[in-house]
Amino acid sequence: MSIYQQIYPKVISKLENNLPSWLYYHSIEHTKYVLEQAIFIAKKENVDKNDLYLLKIAALYHDTGFIINRDEHEAISCEIATEELKEFSLSSEEIKKICEMIMATKIPQKPKSFLSNILADADLEYLGTDKFICFSQDLYKELLHYTPELTQDEWNEIQVKFISKHRYHTAYCKQNREPKKQKNLKMIMKQLNNAD
């Protein structure tokens, strides 16, 4: 059994048992989706086997911090990964790379390496897909737990600002997700204009 095959069930089980129930967006499904997209984009970007292995681990751990706290969850995710990965004979250099990728998912995204670009894009890949409406509503529902008075229009305004500033980092997402992202942005702007 590979090291990754040992790490995967451990992290998934940790998320299943400990994530708060109001995390409609930052759920176990989100982690699995980001992992899937990270693998997909990595193949499009010709990532080698060892880097793919580190990327998959980073994707698995990237939101584990939500178990403890929403604020600074990326840094907490790094602490959890650093602690747990010691028992899997990863070098400190490899763990450092994994943490750099996890920190690249922090908003606003500022990835500093090729692999970080991929995880950052995998995390927000949905912005440029047909899944956007569904994921966006899950995120709205989740935010209502923290800010119950947030209206749908206010949420749409937040999204317009966010998507307008967002940039993809990989060649694949720039080419294949950006056009749809712009359509999704226009759709929300239209909803806002109709609400006025």
Image (cartoon, rainbow, N blue to C red):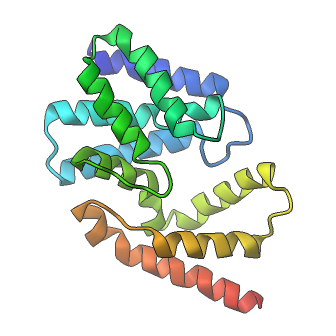
**Is residue 76 among the parts visible in the rendering?**
yes
- Compared with residue 149, is residue 190 higher up or lower down, i.e. above or below? below
Q: Residue at x 77, y 91 (%)?
A: 196
Q: Is residue 87 left or right of residue 65?
A: left
Quarter assignment of residue 125 = bottom left
Quarter assignment of residue 51 = top left
- Compared with residue 163, is residue 107 higher up or lower down, i.e. above or below? above
Quadrant into which the N terminus falls:
top left
Q: Is residue 119 left or right of residue 19?
A: left
Q: Is residue 135 left or right of residue 57?
A: right
Q: Residue at x 45, y 20 (%)?
A: 9
Residue closest to the far top: 87
Q: Is residue 6 left or right of residue 175?
A: right
- Compared with residue 50, is residue 183 higher up or lower down, i.e. above or below? below
Residue 43: % across, % down = 20, 48
Residue 107: % across, % down = 50, 54
